[in-house]
Image (cartoon, rainbow, N blue to C red):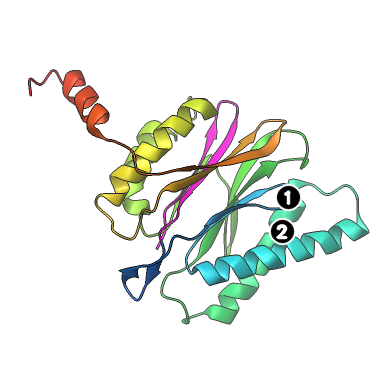
Amino acid sequence: MTLIIGARCQDGIILAADRRRMVRHEIGPDTNKLFKLDCGVALAGAGDDAVLNEARVFIEREVEKSRDQTSRMKLFDIVEITISVVNELVNCYRDKVEEPFGYALAGLENINSGVAKLYTIFGAGFSEVPWSCLGSGSSYARPFLELLLAPGDLTIKESTRAIPTLFTLVSNVQATVGGGVDICIVKDGKGADEIQHFGDVDLEPLRADVINALAIQP
């Protein structure tokens, strides 16, 4: 029960996830769905959070094994490892979890240098994408994402300001999304340098701006 959003910006990739966890259709303790892995990439997952954590452990373990064999690992090598792990988990947990799970992965093409790239990864395969919207809240978020972030003309700083509002809007219509939002930034040439956590956003200023833009007298 999740919302994962990733998008290419002017200067890199922004990846975000809500923190809400549902337990038997009731809101449980907040949980992490977005991680900065030791191998230098950001990973967010939609679906069962136990499966997400299992995937994270396996990915880091397999990347470490691969690094023992080669010192010139690239982002696509980690993508291939993630595909293998996800495919194995899909087969293992088929029909055993309530929500299909998929992942968004962001990083620099040469791990420590190069252009930031965004991938979506499911059991059936993967895609390199300019933006991504996953999870139970995706149908509500997609129109806002296509309007605000999909064009790719905002900077990371501008996108970081827009995303908490987008998540808060979705949480008002989809109870399975909420608990604040984590944001991870992968700047071109600089790597995944931070994860920020935002709580709910005050929407009253947004309402005032919309009313003003529509020339409506409240």
Find residue 159 and report its horizontal and vertical position in percent: 47, 31
- Placement of 186 over or under 137, stated as above or below: above
User: Is 15 contained in the magenta span?
Assistant: yes
**Vertical arrangement, residue 115 with respect to residue 68, above or below:** above
Secondary structure beneath label 2: helix
Locate residue 20: give its quadrant. Answer: bottom left
- Which one is nearer the viewer's eye here, 81 or 128? 81
Figure check: 71 above or below 176:
above
Per the rendered image, the range of residues in magenta is 1-20
How many residues crowd mark 2 within 10 Å: few (<14), some (14–19), many (20+)? Answer: some
Label 1 near label 2: C-beta < 8 Å? yes
Crowdedness of circle 1 by 10 Å Cα count: few (<14), some, many (20+)? some
Name the residue tied to disc 2: 80
Quadrant in which the N terminus appears: bottom left
Q: Amino acid at mark 2?
A: Glu
> In the image, what residue type sits under mark 1?
Phe
Residue 76 disc label: 1
Q: Main secondary structure of the magenta part?
A: strand
Residue 128 covered by magenta stretch: no
Residues 207 and 130: in front is 207
The one of 68 and 161 positioned closer to us in this rendering = 161
Where does residue 198 sit, x and y in percent of width and height? 44, 42
CA–CA distance in space, label 2 to label 1: 6 Å
Q: Is residue 133 left or right of residue 186?
A: left
Choose top left, top right, bottom left or bottom right for residue 87.
bottom right
> For this rendering, which residue is in front, 75 or 159?
159
- Taking the spot 73% from the left edge, 40% from the top edge, the residue there is 109
Tell me residue 49's x, y (percent). 51, 67
- The correct choice, above or below, for 98 with respect to 182 in the image is below
Q: Is residue 123 visible?
A: no
How many marks on residues?
2
